[in-house]
Amino acid sequence: ANTTVGITYFCFLEHNNDDKHNKNCIAVPTHFFKVLLTKNEKIEQFETASFIMSNHHITENLPLSAYQCEVTDIEKCTGLQFFTKAANNDQLYKMDLQQLFEQLHLSNEDKN
């Protein structure tokens, strides 16, 4: 069985002084992200998948792949670093989303 580690957190990518939901100057994150690391036991390699989404109601029916980005994109906008030991060893590969869905046992309806 594969082992998966997931990190979910928020970030501030844009500043809007006209935010109607922030009348008391409370910092409201503009986006949230998820970074996944899986060790593929069959081929002995680490695979990553990362996603970033707006912290607003999403009305479009977009596939998860529309929100996919590189781990380095999230690192640049947050100042955080992920999986540095694996990255330093050039052991990170981009995760196949279809494989991820199969691993998580998601149906076709859940992918959108």
Image (spheres, rainbow, N blue to C red):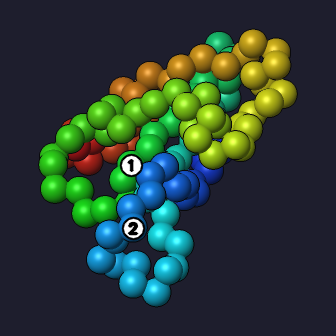
User: Is the residue under label 2 in contact with that under label 1 (CB below 8 Å)?
Assistant: no
Residue 44 locus on image (x, y percent): 71, 17
25 in relation to 81, above or below:
below
State which quadrant residue 40 falls in.
top right
Local SS, label 2:
loop
Query: Which of the two discs, 1 and 2, labels the residue nearer the N terminus?
Result: 2
Say which quadrant the N terminus sits in.
top right
Residue 93's place in the image compared with 64, above or below, is above
In space, the residues marked 1 and 2 are separated at their CA atoms by: 20 Å
Mark 2: few/some/many CA within 10 Å (<14, 14-19, 20+): few
Q: Residue at x 78, y 24 (%)?
A: 86
Q: What's the residue type where badge 1 is placed? A: Met
Query: Which residue sits at x=75%, y=22%?
Result: 87
Q: Which mark is residue 17?
A: 2
**Image disc number at residue 75:** none
Label 1 sits on residue: 53
Q: Is residue 63 left or right of residue 38?
A: left
**Residue type indicated by callout 2:** Asn
Query: Who is closer to the viewer here, 61 or 11?
Result: 11
Q: Secondary structure at mark 1?
A: strand
